[in-house]
Amino acid sequence: MALKALLLRKQLDDKNKALEVLRAKDAELQAREAELETAIGEAESAEDKTAVEGLVDEFEQDKQAHEEEKTKLAGEVEQLEQDLAAEEAKQTPPGSPAPAPDNAPIGGERKDDRIMNMKRRGFTGLDRQQRDAFLAREDVKDFLQRVRALGKEQRGVTGAELTIPTVFLELIRENISRYSKLIGKVALRSVPGNARQTIMGTVPEAVWTEMCANLNELSLSFNQIEVDGYKVGGFIAVCNAVLEDSDLNLASEIMDAIGQAIGYALDKAIVYGTGTKMPVGIVTRLAQTAKPSDWGTNAPDWKDVSATNLVTIAGKTGAELYRSIILDAGVAKSTYSRGPLTWVMNETTKAQLTAEALSVNAAGAIVSGQGNTMPVVGGDIVTLDFIPVGDVVFGYMDLYLLAQRAGAQLAQSEHVRFLEDQTVFKGTARYDGMPVFGEAFGLMNIAGKEPTTTATFPPDTANSETP
C-alpha cells in the first residue's frame, strides 16, 4: 500500500476510535437528563428551582457541544473514507482483473479491514459505497437471485434449502451478537458435533520439606463436561412487495429479523434455560438442589449452591444497599475465571440502583456513582427486559460454556401464505451450553423478595402432539 493511503487509513482509524468514544458518552448524557427530570419534579423552594435551572443550562451546553463534536468527527470520517477510496483506486492499474469474490474489497477496504468493520458496525453500519459493493458481490447476488427465483418461479417447491454465502453467515452472526447482549460475555466455542470441555482440577498446594529430603507426590485431576446441540429459530413472513424492492431492503429484512429473534432467545436460555431441548441457564443451575440425572460421569463434582448463592436483600437503601450487594457478591467464586464480574438485570432495577447511588457533588450538581458498571466492586451491567424487577443475576460469565454449531441456514416457501401474498422465511441456529461451575454465579433480589428461578419460554406448539 502507498504511504499516503497508509497515512489516510491511520487517520481514519484514529477518527473512528474518537467517534466511538464520543458515542459511548451518549449513555452518560441520557443518565444526566433523567436525573435532571427527577430533580425538576422534586424542586419546590425557589432556591432549589434556581439551582436546577443552572444545572439544566449547563447540561444543554454540554449536550450541544457533544453533538457538534460528534457531527464534526462524523464528517471528517466520511471525508477520510472518500479520500482513502480515491487513493487506493489510483494504486489499481487500469484494466486489472477483478479480485476473487471472497477477497473482493468493500468500499476500498481489504478483506481483514472489512471484517473488522463489519464486526464493529454490522451491516446497517456500512456506508452506501460499502453496501453497494457488498451487494454487488457475485455470491451475494447469486443468493438473492435464488431467493427470488424460488419465491416467484417455483411455487411448488417447499422448504428449499439455501446455502448462505460466507459473507452472509458473517453478517447474520454479527446481528446475533448485536441483539444478544450475553454472547460476547460467555465462553463461546464453535464446534461441529458433540463437544467435551476439559477442566483442570484445583491446583494442589506444594509441600515444604528439608533441603535434601524426598519430594512429596502432588495430586492433580482433570474433568470434562459434555455439550450437545439444540436448534433455536422460527419463521417470519415477508410481504412479496418487499422481495420486489432493492437488494438492500431484502437483505436487511432477512438478516435483521433473524438476528433479533435468535439473539433474544439465546440470551434468555443463557439465564433461564431449562436444559430440555435448550441450554442449561445460570439461574436454573443455581436453583438445583440435587445433582441432575444427566450430570456426566467425568464432570466436576456437583455442588448444591441453592442455599448460598440465592440471596435476598431487604430493607436496605443508599450506601447500606450497596454494602450488602458487595458483600453478597462474594458468594460467586472466581477460582477458574479470567474475567470480571458481570451484572444482569432489567432497566427498572438498574434505574432503582442508580437512584440509590445519587449524591450531590461539591459544585451542587446531582450525580450518581453508578453508570454502566457496578460501583466499588466493578463489572459491566447488562440490561435484559425478561428478568423480573428486583432480581440481579451476577457472576463470572467466562465460566459459562456456550457451544455454537456450524451450518446456519435459510429456507423459503411462498405457498404457505399464498393467499396473503407473503413469502415465509425460516431461520435456524444451533447452540448448547451450561455453567461450568455453579459456584461462579449468584442471584440476588434487592427488593426483599425471593429471587425468581424460572421463566416462561414460548411453547413448542409446532412439535406438540395434538389430542
Image (spheres, rainbow, N blue to C red):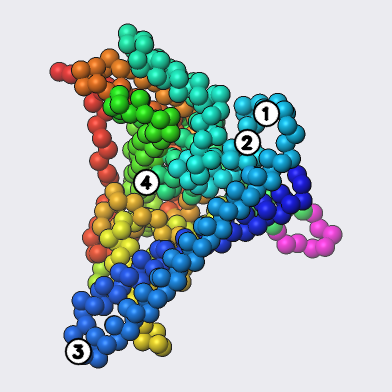
Amino acid at circle 1: Pro
* Amino acid type indicated by mark 2: Pro
Q: Amino acid at mark 4?
A: Val
What quarter of the picture does the C terminus occupy? top left
Question: For numbered disc 4, what is the local secondary structure?
Answer: helix
What's the amino acid at mark 3?
Answer: Ser
- Between marks 2 and 1, how big is the CA–CA gap? 8 Å
Question: Mark 3 or 1, which is nearer the eye?
Answer: 1
Mark 4 or 3: the one toward you: 3
Q: Which mark is residue 45?
A: 3
Image x and y of residue 422, in percent = 27, 23
Q: Residues within 10 Å of mark 4 (few under 14, many from 20)?
A: many
The residue indicated by pointer 4 is: 271
Residue furthest bottom as drawn: 47
**Mark positioned earlier in the residue sequence (3 or 2):** 3
Q: Quadrant of the N terminus?
A: top right
Outermost residue on the top side: it is 156
Boundaries of the magenta span: 207-214
The numbered dot on residue 99 is 1
